[in-house]
Amino acid sequence: MTRPADDLLATARQALIRVRHETPLVQCLTNQVVSNFTANVLLALGAAPAMVDIPEEAGPFAKAASGVLVNVGTPHAEQRAAMTEAVASAARAGTPWVLDPVAIGSLRVRTALAHRLAAQGPAVVRGNASEIIALAGTGGGGRGVDATDEVESAAAAAGTLARATGAVVAVSGPVDLLTDGERTVRVANGDPLLTRVTGGGCALGAVLAAFAPSAAPSPSPSPASDGDRLAAAVAAVTVYTVAAEVAAERSSGPGSFAAAFLDALYGLDEDTLDKRAAISWT
């Protein structure tokens, strides 16, 4: 008899194969600091990045995309308009989209934007603990892009946010926590070098968008199955963080890690996932 974590691992294997076979088109409205790294991560994984983030293009493109990432890291006025347009278009077309509320809480413009977007039905919300707490309305945010809260201290806020938005909420940290408001999964993979590379967290939002198209909300509290939005998000996080572990073993520091991480994503196989994945279900 399989255990819930075994089902999640099986879904991760299937999802990785599907991404490589189907080459999902991922529209990225993301911050200018991480755009290049994000595109390279998607390419290494087998997805197709498209940095379409200006008004009048963002909306029509969201209809054609497989998934959309909205990352509020550098939200200049034109990009804010494009994000609003893309999210509305994605909602009409049924395109799953991911919200990454970078550095919200203490910064007024992006905080207001993130709250407006969160009300529009994201498939996934991904952030560090302080960002998730701020988006849930139970705290003031971290120190810029850095969290000042621990992952476990954001668990209640993540559940509240998931139930309010209908999204899977992924809290990034040493042990990632993911919840749909009813079920909670932890993924204990990854490496601290991810935090020493610009875009290490932001690119995960794009990977979540690449894995999201095969999933739909599941009301069942039973173990994961194909088409389960939570399971798809767990698959994305597991693939990403296992690749980080592999890359860290081949690296001497952040510079070599960034290149090794792209190689690890490109070469990641099912056997490596089986051996390394550390998934627990609560």
Image: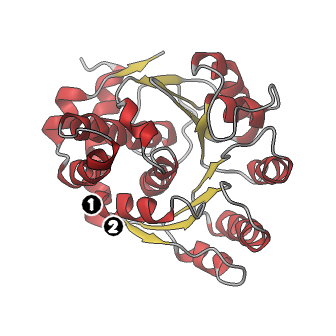
Residue at x 16%, y 36% (from the top left corner)? 272
The local secondary structure at tag 2 comes to loop
The extreme left residue here reads 271
Residue at x 35%, y 31% (from the top left corner)? 190
- On residue 23, the disc is 2
**Picture coordinates of residue 203, whole percent (x, y):** 47, 52
In the displayed structure image, the side of residue 183 where residue 12 appears, left or right: left
Residue at x 53%, y 73% (from the top left corner)? 51
**Picture coordinates of residue 121, whole percent (x, y):** 71, 51
In the displayed structure image, the side of residue 177 where residue 276 appears, left or right: left
Q: Amino acid at mark 2?
A: Thr
- The answer to whether mark 1 and mark 2 are in CB contact below 8 A is yes
**Picture coordinates of residue 20, whole percent (x, y):** 27, 60
The colouring scheme, among rainbow, by chain, secondary structure or one colour, is secondary structure
> Pointer 1: residues within 10 angstroms few (<14), some, or many (20+)?
some
Tell which of 27 and 134 is nearer to you: 134
The answer to whether residue 88 is above or below residue 267 is below
